[in-house]
Image: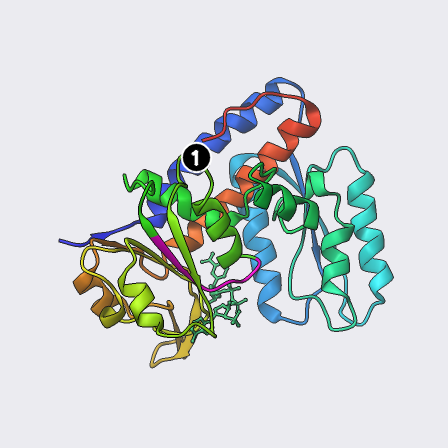
């Protein structure tokens, strides 16, 4: 029987533990606070920000919100970041991507105070992750580590194959898998669009993480017997549903399930974990900035 890894269930457990961590901050007189900045041409960005704010409120994190229209100058966005950077009551900052074309996305990442960079994308935080001393683990790969741990899957000595080398998923996932710590110590291969004989690599994986952004791209023929398959992809494809589309992963679920020992569904696998780990980083940031010890799950 293939285990279907329930991300909603694990994320709910983590959120419950995080509420306790918020109580510890409050007992020390600290109100954790998350500042979001929305300036995006993508209509879905507004939904993403409000989902993150609702998640925060659910565990007791305050939110501040700045909304800018896409025709405003980049300086306005930088000024909003500076204001959050300088406000000691704001512990974590997120600028929802994508930003408009006239805004330099790299400059945005570099503008955020690295101590408040709860996405973990500031070059200083990327450097710390690569050096093996992460300040904030990026949310999606951290969530995957937690998902594996909760499912009782040990990564040590395993062959992990990551398909995708993006800044937000593939690269940090590989960095976490090779760390000398629990949830790491895996022998890690990173594949990308120039990889030759991809199936040969994926078939060899004990743990296969797919983040390619291509609907149902990895099927059962690319999965080794008994592998653990983590599907990061979230793709909208046309479908005969009320909304006119459905969400599918980067893995062809039914055929991969035939081969896998455990697999994440889409939706309900990695997605809820990413959201939970953002809360984790905000609470961690608040503890660090206010010098309060908090028990993180
Ligand atoms: P990117 O588009 O930034 O990166 C995709 C990666 O996949 C690239 O490294 C690319 O290679 C590689 N790739 C593309 N095609 C192939 C191929 N044919 N063979 C091998 N590798 C290939 O995507 P993201 O990492 O941002 O996201 C990936 C997916 O995960 C998306 O569906 C996204 O929506 C989803 N996602 C889900 C999250 C969640 O919480 N569940 C969070 C973040 C993302 P190259 O570098 O050579 O171009």
Query: Where residue 212 sits: x, y (%)?
Result: 45, 68
Q: How many marks?
A: 1
- Residue 169 visible? The answer is no
Depicted 190 relative to depicted 129: above or below: below
User: What percent of the width, then of the height, locates residue 37?
Assistant: 71, 54
Which span is picked out in magenta?
A: 160-167
> Which image quarter: residue 291?
top right
Give the color scheme: rainbow, by chain, secondary structure or one colour. rainbow
Residue at horizontal 21 percent and vertical 69 percent from the top: 255
- Relative horizontal placement of residue 134, taking residue 271 as reference (left or right): right
Residue 164, image x and y in percent? Answer: 47, 64
- State the residue in front, 233 or 194: 194
Mark 1 CB within 8 Å of ligand 1: no
Identify the residue at horizontal 43%, vertical 33% (top origin): 16
Residue most extreme to the left: 1
Q: Would you name the residue on which mark 1 appears?
A: 181
Where is residue 279? Give x, y as percent: 54, 41
Residue 102 seen anywhere in this rendered image of the structure? yes
* Crowding near the residue tagged with mark 1, few <14, some 14–19, many ≥20 C-alpha atoms within 10 Å: few
Quadrant containing the C terminus is: top left
Taking depth in this image into account, of 154 and 258 the one nearest to the observer is: 154
Rendered view: 124 above or below 248: above
When the figure is inspected, residue 151 is found, relative to residue 47, above or below; the finding is above
> Per the image, is 65 magenta?
no
Residue drawn at point x = 25 percent, y = 64 percent: 223
Give me the residue at 36% from left, 48% from top. 8
Magenta-drawn stretch contains 162: yes
Image side of residue 81 versus residue 154, left or right: right
Quadrant in which residue 125 is drawn: top right
Could you tell me which secondary element the residue under label 1 belongs to?
loop
């Amino acid at each position: 029987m293939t285990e279907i890894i329930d991300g909603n269930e694990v994320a709910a457990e983590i959120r419950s533990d995080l509420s306790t961590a918020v109580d510890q901050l409050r007992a020390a007189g600290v109100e954790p606070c998350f500042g979001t900045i929305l300036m995006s041409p993508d209509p879905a960005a507004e939904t993403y920000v409000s989902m993150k704010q609702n998640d925060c409120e659910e565990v007791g994190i305050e939110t501040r919100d700045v909304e800018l229209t896409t025709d405003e100058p980049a300086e306005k966005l930088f000024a909003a970041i500076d204001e959050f950077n300088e406000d000691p009551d704001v512990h974590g900052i997120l600028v929802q991507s994508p930003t408009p074309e006239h805004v330099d996305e790299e400059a945005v990442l570099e503008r955020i105070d690295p101590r408040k960079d709860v996405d973990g994308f500031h070059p200083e935080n990327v450097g710390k992750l690569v050096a093996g001393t992460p300040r904030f683990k990026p949310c999606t790969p951290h969530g995957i580590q937690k998902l594996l741990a909760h499912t009782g899957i040990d990564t040590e000595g395993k062959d992990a194959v990551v398909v995708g080398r993006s800044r937000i998923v593939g690269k940090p996932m590989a960095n976490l898998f090779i760390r000398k710590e629990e949830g790491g110590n895996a022998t890690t291969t990173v594949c990308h669009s120039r990889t030759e004989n991809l199936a040969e690599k994926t078939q060899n994986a004990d743990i296969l993480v797919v983040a390619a952004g291509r609907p149902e791209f990895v099927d059962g023929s690319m999965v080794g017997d008994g592998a653990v398959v983590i599907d990061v992809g979230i793709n909208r494809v046309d479908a005969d549903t009320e909304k006119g589309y459905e969400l599918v992963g980067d893995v062809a679920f039914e055929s991969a399930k035939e081969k896998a020992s455990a697999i994440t569904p889409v939706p309900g696998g990695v997605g809820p974990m990413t959201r939970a780990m953002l809360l984790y980083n905000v609470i961690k940031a608040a503890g660090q900035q206010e010098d309060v010890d908090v028990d993180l799950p």
